[in-house]
Structure formats: C-alpha cells, structure tokens
Image (cartoon, helix red, strand yellow):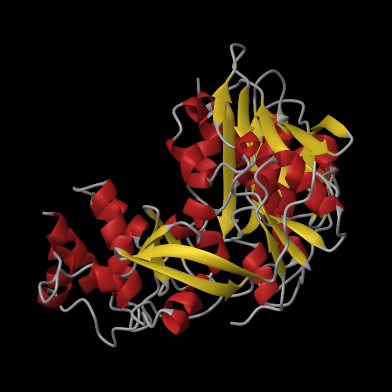
C-alpha cells in the first residue's frame, strides 16, 4: 500500500530528536511502527514528518536499581523485555508482553510505543497504572517525571506532548501482580483487561472500559470486595461489534477478580 | 542543538541475502515494496497489507518482522534475509525439504512467510516443543488452513 508522502528524519541524539519534533508540529515520533505504520496506511493519521527514534541510546536498555526499581528504556521491544534477566524482577511485565500479538510484532513493537499510543485496548497502560509506574518525559525545556495516574489522558493521548519524548519508564519493586484479559483470539486485542498489584494495598486497573485505564483500590482481595469496587466505579464502557457495554461491565468484574487471585497466588 | 535532516527521499544501503544494494527510496515506501518492486525479489508476498497475515515476513539483522510494517528507510544499513536466500542453489534447506516432504503448502501463498518464521524459530531454538512451534507461527495466517502439515514439517525439521 502506498502511504501518503512523508518526510523522514533519523536523529542521532535525543537533543536532535526533540529539535526535529519542535521544528514541525506535524512531526511524529516513530518507535517500532507496529501501530503507526498501519495507522498511516489507513489514513487514520498522516504525519508530515516521521522522527525515527531507532538510534537514540537514551531510550534503550533495562536497568535494575539497588532498591528493585526497574528503569526501562521507551524503545525496549516486547521481545527484549521478555528476554531480559533484569525485567524478571517484576515478572508480570514479561508475561503480559508475551501475550501481545505475535513474534514479529513483539520483535519490533516497543513498550514506550504501547504506552504512548494509549489505545484503550492496549495491554500495557492498565499494567503500568496498577503497578504505579512513573514516566520520564523529556522536552526541550528539560525532564519531568509523570506518575501513571497523570500520564494517560485520553484515547491516543498522554502527557507526552507532540514536541516531547517518553524516554524511560520506571517500575517500582514488587512481585505480587496479576493480569487477566478476554481477547479477540489467543494473544489478540483486548476486549476487557484487568491488572492487579498487591504490594501493600490492593491496586487494580481496568482496561478497555474507558478512555484511560480505570484505577481502583478495593478494600481487600476478597472477591466480593473486588466486585464491589468495580461496581462502585459505575463503568460506562462502549459497545461495539465484539461486546456490548453490559457484557464489558460484566467482564470487568470477572477479570478484576481473576487478576487479583493471580496476584494473591504469588509469593 | 540542530534539528536532524528531514527528507522525503533517502539513499539507503542494504544487504539482501548477501548481496549489497544501494538505492534511493521514498520515505513512504514499505520494505516489502522495496524488496519486490525495486529489487525484484518477489518471493516475499503481500497477503493483507495490514500487518496481520505474515506473508511478508523477513529477517532483518537477525530479527523476524513483517516487512509491510517497516519503511525501507528504516532498514538502511541492515542485513536482510528473504525466502530467496534459504536454498543453497538448487539444494533446499532442511526446513524447505521438510515442507516438501510433508505437503506443507497448498496454494503456497503463505509459504515464504511460514518458512521465514520457522527459520527464525529453529535458529533461536533448535528443539522447540509443540507449543513453541505453534506460538512461533502465530503471526502467519494460512488461508488454505493447512496448518497441520506446516506444523508437522517444522517439527520434522527440528528433529
């Protein structure tokens, strides 16, 4: 398929990339391209300039801090995360990445791209929300650290503005996490997803039921308490060809319980 | 700090199946079209053009990917392997021979992608489990639904 004509830049440094984005408000960051290239084929988006992040070392690598915090470069591919020994410090991350699409997509798609696209059906936004991740955002004016609660702003919208870049994702230490989803086929797009983290309190995030992950804090891990927390959120999810609003509401309760139970089963 | 150079067209150098090519390409050109239209390597197929079917799968710098979801300019400097590079002259690779022996193709349209996915699997994991074979071929659709024989062929090649 022929894409609309587009400019392409391949900056060698983060500074150069930010300058290139700021120079044209029609410029967009190109990470793994597993969403953006298809969006361009469908003409759902037509950037004037693609700024390829492939050579930016600042956006690569996974580091495990002394306090157990994982510092994940935004350009880390799903496969790199799945195979990373450091990332095993928070096993849920690799487990969820292994459920995204297929080998080819996992080899190219990036965790930063998944977060920044913030498609409501994406796997990682609810996971990052439940785990309490922090997002390091760089602009020409400097760097800021945005908590997950403030990062996801709307459908396809995050706190990283057009002339900024998500550079790193910081995930605090913890192991008692769970994830459950009903998908379109094995490893397919989520119809509803739920992520839970039990590392002091119960942190729950539901995906696909609103523009951004819905963050909840049930009083306990008791299934009825979890269901009550989901009901109290008065979710109003969209209906589409895959599921009615009522069915999504039903799934949100069931999957929240499953995610919490999975997290409870871990030491 | 200056902005990076922006251009609608770029000169790229790629090595495909061991042969080096230098070409000017439009930034909007997908790698699959570069391989097929500019280099006349028509072994890789366009099945769906939406990133779903895997018929365009190739190996770029050792990584299996779908060449309809990568721009040719992104592959600048890369070493690319396509289905044309699997056989040694007339001699089929062990995997290709297994596809022949197990009747692992019907219409053959998905075969180039299946072969590349299975090649990538066997390089990484010489003795995959049945589950690992299935998972490795998940990104490749066979609309003849001839999955069973494809699975058998990969299993045989791994033994």
Vertically, is A89 above or below B42? above
- Looking at the image, which residue is at 28% across and 68% down? B115
**A258 and A179: which is toward the camera:** A179
In the displayed structure, would residue A132 be above or below residue A47? above
Q: Residue at x 73, y 29 (%)?
A: A132
Quadrant assignment, res A124: top right
Image quadrant assignment for residue A120: bottom right
Among the 4 quarters of the image, the one containing residue A127: top right
Q: Note whether residue B52 is visible.
A: no
The residue closer to the viewer here, A11 or B116, is A11
On the image, the x and y values in percent for residue A65 come to 60, 17
Would you say B125 lies left or right of A222 here?
left
Image quarter in which the N terminus of chain A is found: bottom right
Residue shown at 51%/60% (left/top)?
B76
Tell which of B78 and A40 is nearer to you.
Answer: B78
Q: Where is residue A6 in the image (x, y as percent from the top left)?
A: 72, 71
Image spot of residue A171 (x, y percent): 66, 28
Q: Horizontally, is A48 left or right of A52 in the view?
A: right
Q: As drawn, is B157 to the left or to the right of A150?
A: left
The residue depicted at 28 percent of the width and 47 percent of the height is B124
Q: Where is residue B84 in the image (x, y as percent from the top left)?
A: 27, 74
């Amino acid at each position: 398929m022929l894409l609309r004509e587009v400019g392409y830049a391949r900056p060698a440094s983060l500074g150069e990339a930010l300058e290139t984005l700021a120079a044209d408000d029609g410029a967009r960051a190109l990470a793994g391209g597993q969403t953006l290239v298809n969006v361009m084929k469908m003409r759902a988006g037509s950037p004037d300039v693609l700024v390829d992040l492939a050579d930016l070392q600042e956006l690569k690598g996974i580091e495990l801090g002394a306090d157990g915090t994982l510092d994940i470069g935004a350009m880390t591919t799903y496969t790199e995360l799945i195979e990373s020994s450091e990332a095993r410090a928070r096993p849920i991350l690799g487990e969820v990445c292994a459920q995204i699409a297929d080998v080819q997509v996992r080899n190219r798609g990036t965790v930063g791209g998944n977060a920044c696209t913030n498609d409501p059906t994406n796997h990682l936004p609810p996971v990052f929300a439940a785990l309490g991740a922090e997002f390091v955002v760089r602009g020409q004016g400097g760097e800021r650290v945005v908590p997950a609660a403030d990062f996801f702003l709307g459908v396809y919208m995050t706190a990283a503005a057009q002339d900024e870049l998500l550079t790193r994702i910081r995930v605090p230490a913890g192991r008692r996490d769970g994830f459950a989803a009903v998908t379109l086929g094995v490893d397919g797009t989520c119809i509803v997803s739920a992520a839970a983290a039990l590392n002091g309190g119960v942190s729950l995030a539901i995906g696909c039921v609103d523009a951004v992950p819905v963050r909840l804090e049930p009083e306990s891990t008791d299934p009825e308490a979890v269901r009550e927390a989901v009901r109290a959120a008065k979710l109003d999810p969209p209906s589409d060809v895959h599921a009615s609003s009522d069915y999504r509401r039903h799934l949100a309760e069931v999957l929240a319980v499953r995610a919490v139970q999975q997290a409870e089963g871990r030491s | 700090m200056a902005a990076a150079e922006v251009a609608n067209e770029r000169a790229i150098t790629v090595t495909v199946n061991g042969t080096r090519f230098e070409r000017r390409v439009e930034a909007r050109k997908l790698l699959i079209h570069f391989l097929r239209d500019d280099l006349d390597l028509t072994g890789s197929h366009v099945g769906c053009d939406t990133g779903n079917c895997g018929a365009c799968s190739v190996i770029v710098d050792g990584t299996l990917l779908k060449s309809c979801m990568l721009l040719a300019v992104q592959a600048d400097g890369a070493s690319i392997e396509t289905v044309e590079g699997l056989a040694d002259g007339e001699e089929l690779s062990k995997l290709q021979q297994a596809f022949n022996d197990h009747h692992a193709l019907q219409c053959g349209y998905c075969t180039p992608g299946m072969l590349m996915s299975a090649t990538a699997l066997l390089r990484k994991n010489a003795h995959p489990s049945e589950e690992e074979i299935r998972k490795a071929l998940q990104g490749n659709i066979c609309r003849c639904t001839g999955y069973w024989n494809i699975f058998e062929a990969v299993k045989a090649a791994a033994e």
